[in-house]
Amino acid sequence: MSDTINSKTVDGLFAFCDFMVEKGYATSAAMDPWKTAARKVFGAVFGEGFESETLDGIDLDDVLGRFETLTRSQYKHESLVTYGRRVRNAIDGYMEFLDTGRPPQLRKARTAPVAKKAETKAPAAKVTKKAATDPAPMGELIKFPFPLRSGEMAQLQLPARLQREDADRLSAFLRTLQVETQKEIPERTGEEAQAA
């Protein structure tokens, strides 16, 4: 195993993805999206030479927030969320590999047989409809940075997809928190102003 894969850098992450494919632990279809997402996120945030950036102790929430700010006009919101999820999964898998010495078990590999059984028992339309309406599990909440006019950064922790009813309720809740600035009374009011 090369020194690059042990470097805990973005380059090491790429070497890890290549190792997973070469040794048959994952397909290139599973690893290429991780590499692409890492290339886009770290390239946008760190610029040229991003491959040498260390991932050891990286504040990924900060990096993903900066990526969203820098590329908001280039990508749809869904793409930003997807890139963030892929980079997080890639780094988690890479660090697990470095800690344990064992390749991580990819979720799709474990759940594929179960999904196939469900498809044979129920018509495809019903399976698709159920998947679309199921809320995201609690562990899959995503932090959405939201810049406030005061310059502070709010963090909303939400599922990747919200149902319309939940979005409406959340909007109504946020409106209860709003504060309107009070208009100041002028120094000179009606009668005083006319007398002057």
Image (cartoon, rainbow, N blue to C red):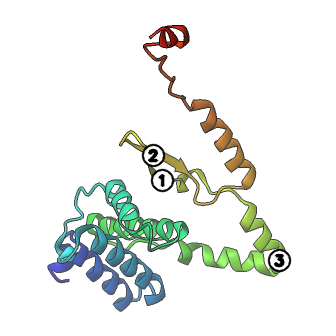
Determine whether, in the image, residue 24 is placed left or right of residue 181.
left
Q: Which residue is mark 2?
A: 155
Q: Amino acid at mark 1?
A: Phe
What label sits on residue 132 in the rendered view?
none
Q: Nearer the viewer, residue 99 or 40?
A: 40
CA neighbours of label 2 inside 10 A, class few (<14), some (14 to 19), many (20+) = some
Question: Residue drawn at (36%, 80%), measured in percent from left and top?
Answer: 35
Q: Are marks 1 and 2 in contact (CB under 8 Å)?
A: yes
Number of marks drawn: 3
Residue position marked by numbered label 3 in the rendering: 125
First-in-chain label (1 vs 2)? 1
Residue 119: image quadrant is bottom right
Which badge, 2 or 3, comes first in the chain's sequence? 3
Tell me if mark 3 has few (under 14), some (14-19) or many (20+) residues whose alpha carbon lies within 10 angstroms of its own.
few
Quadrant of the image containing the N terminus: bottom left
**Please, is residue 71 above or below residue 56 in the view?**
below
User: Taking 189 as reference, is 46 left or right?
Assistant: left
- View extreme (bottom): residue: 22
| Disc 1 packing (10 Å; few <14; some 14–19; many ≥20) | some
Element carrying mark 1 = strand
Which secondary structure lies at badge 3?
helix
Which amino acid does the dot numbered 3 rest on?
Ala
Dot 2 amino acid type: Gln
Mark 3 and mark 1: Cα distance apart in space:
31 Å
Local SS, label 2: strand
Nearest to the observer: residue 14 or residue 169: 169
Q: Quadrant of the C terminus?
A: top left
Q: Which residue is mark 1?
A: 144
